Structure formats: C-alpha cells, structure tokens
Image: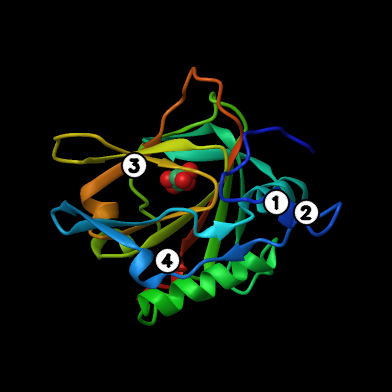
C-alpha cells in the first residue's frame, strides 16, 4: 500500500539509504528533551517532539508490514465499529520494525518502570483519513483502572490532534502529534482524564499511532 502525505521536516531525503525501505528510522535521546506538562488531579503528560528520525520511512514500513484489522470497541452495553484500523502485539511478540523494540526498551529505561508496569504490549492504530477517529475515553483495561499507570504513544505520518480533558470538566487541551513525536500519559491520567482523536474535515494525510502499555491483564 502506498499513501502520500506531507513528509516530516525532520526527515532529510538526502539520507535515504535503501530504494525500497528508505532510510532506517532512528531514535533521538530522551532525557532533558522530554517536556512534562502537569494536568492536575495527579495526571501528567510528557512530550518529546520528533523522537523518531526518518519517521516517514517508519510510517511506510508499518503500512506495508502490519496485519491491519477493523477496530471494534465496547461502548456501554454494545460492541461498536470504530473508524480506524488496528493491530495488537502482546508481550514477547516480534514488533513490526526493530525501531519499535528499541523504543519500548528506551521507554522502560527512561521511566524505570516497576514490576507489573513495564511497557510490554504495543497497540497500533491506523487513521487513514480525517474520518478515522477515536471517541473520548480513558484506557480501562484489566485491573489498572484503580491505580496510576502509563501509556506511551509514538505518532508517525501526518499530524492529528490528541485532545485531553478532565472527567470533572474544565478546558480541553489539544496536542498535535505526528512525524515521530512521543507523548506519554502518566499518573492518574487514565482514571481522572479522557482523551480522543476527533474527526476532521481538514484534508489530512494518514497517521499511525503506536501505543506502548504494560500488560494490564497481568498487573497485580
Ligand atoms: O491515536 C492515538 O494516538 C490515541 C489512541 C488511543 O487513545 C487508544 O487507542 O486508546
């Protein structure tokens, strides 16, 4: 599959090193380049723009290599279709590009995850057009809803906006994500806040989001 989108300003075409696979995606450092945003109620976000270099090449690889499936999600008492494609890689699964395994390991090192909270699954979502979206929700899998946890999102392809709001009301904050950006949701975020990717009528290109999570089904 080949899709066109505006390439990242961080991806230097002169560095393309394989006519088929393109340049090898690479990770930048974390450390001081990560910006913490406190959201209140114990929730926080970390942002690291452009963490993955050659992210457009990673996007193309994931489009081709990942076994994409239609998404369905429990909403109240029903299971409904969600407009986007998904693929899930459980603990010890071989991830669809080596840079994703490097990213998972770098995140575990940077955040020093305790037992039961180590990033070990990867959920991939493919937003093909501005019609693909995910409604307001907090991640509530397994037993993690009653404790602090972390979800790390790497975005490649075109920019889409992740919106965040407190469950108790107040302002909606918007974070444009794409082209190799990293966003990490932490603290109480999945209990006290919700997030979404809204549909847009703007002519946006396709985006893939990679979400690293603990294996919440095994969290003690
Ligand atoms: O697309 C994203 O980056 C967010 C996806 C998300 O919130 C989810 O799948 O639960």
Residue labelled 1 has its Cβ within 8 Å of some atom of ligand 1: no
| Mark number, residue 216 | 4
- In the displayed image of the protein, which residue is found farthest to the top? 201
Q: CA distance from mark 4 to mark 2?
A: 35 Å
Q: CA distance from mark 4 to mark 1?
A: 31 Å
Q: For mark 2, does the 10 Å Cα neighbourhood hold few (<14), some (14 to 19), or many (20 or more) residues?
A: some
Q: CA distance from mark 4 to mark 3?
A: 19 Å
The correct choice, above or below, for 171 with respect to 57 in the image is above
Residue 132 percent location from the top left of the image: 54, 29
Q: For mark 4, does the 10 Å Cα neighbourhood hold few (<14), some (14 to 19), or many (20 or more) residues?
A: many
Asked whether 144 or 190 is in front, the reply is: 190
Q: Quadrant of residue 52?
A: bottom right
Q: Nearer the viewer, mark 4 or mark 2?
A: 2
Residue 64 percent location from the top left of the image: 77, 47
| Mark number, residue 157 | none
Q: CA distance from mark 3 to mark 1?
A: 27 Å
The mark that comes first in sequence, 2 or 3, is 2
Residue 168 percent location from the top left of the image: 13, 40
Element at label 1: helix
Residue beneath disc 3: 195
Residue beneath disc 2: 22
Residue beneath disc 1: 57
Element at label 3: strand
**Residue found 30% across the figure and 59% down from its top:** 35
The mark that comes first in sequence, 1 or 2, is 2
The correct choice, above or below, for 199 with respect to 57 in the image is above
Residue labelled 3 has its Cβ within 8 Å of some atom of ligand 1: yes
Q: CA distance from mark 2 to mark 3?
A: 33 Å
**Residue found 44% across the figure and 68% down from its top:** 214
Element at label 4: helix
């Amino acid at each position: 599959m080949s899709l066109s989108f505006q390439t990242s300003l961080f991806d230097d075409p002169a560095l393309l090193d394989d006519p088929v696979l393109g340049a090898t995606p690479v990770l930048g450092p974390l450390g001081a380049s990560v910006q913490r945003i406190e959201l209140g109620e114990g929730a926080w976000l970390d942002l690291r723009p452009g963490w993955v270099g050659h992210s457009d090449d990673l996007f193309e690889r994931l489009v081709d290599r990942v076994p994409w499936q239609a998404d369905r999600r429990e909403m109240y008492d029903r299971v409904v279709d969600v407009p986007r494609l998904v693929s899930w890689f459980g603990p010890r699964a071989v991830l669809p590009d080596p840079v994703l395994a490097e990213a998972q390991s770098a995140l575990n090192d940077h955040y020093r995850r305790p037992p039961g909270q180590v990033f070990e699954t990867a959920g991939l979502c493919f937003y093909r057009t501005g019609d693909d979206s995910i409604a307001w929700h907090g991640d509530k899998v397994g037993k993690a809803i009653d404790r602090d946890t972390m979800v790390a999102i790497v975005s490649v392809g075109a920019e889409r906006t992740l919106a965040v709001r407190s469950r108790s009301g107040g302002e909606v904050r918007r974070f444009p994500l794409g082209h190799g950006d990293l966003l990490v949701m932490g603290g109480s975020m999945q209990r006290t806040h919700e997030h979404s990717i809204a549909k847009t009528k703007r002519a946006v290109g396709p985006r893939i989001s990679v979400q690293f999570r603990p294996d919440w089904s095994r969290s003690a």
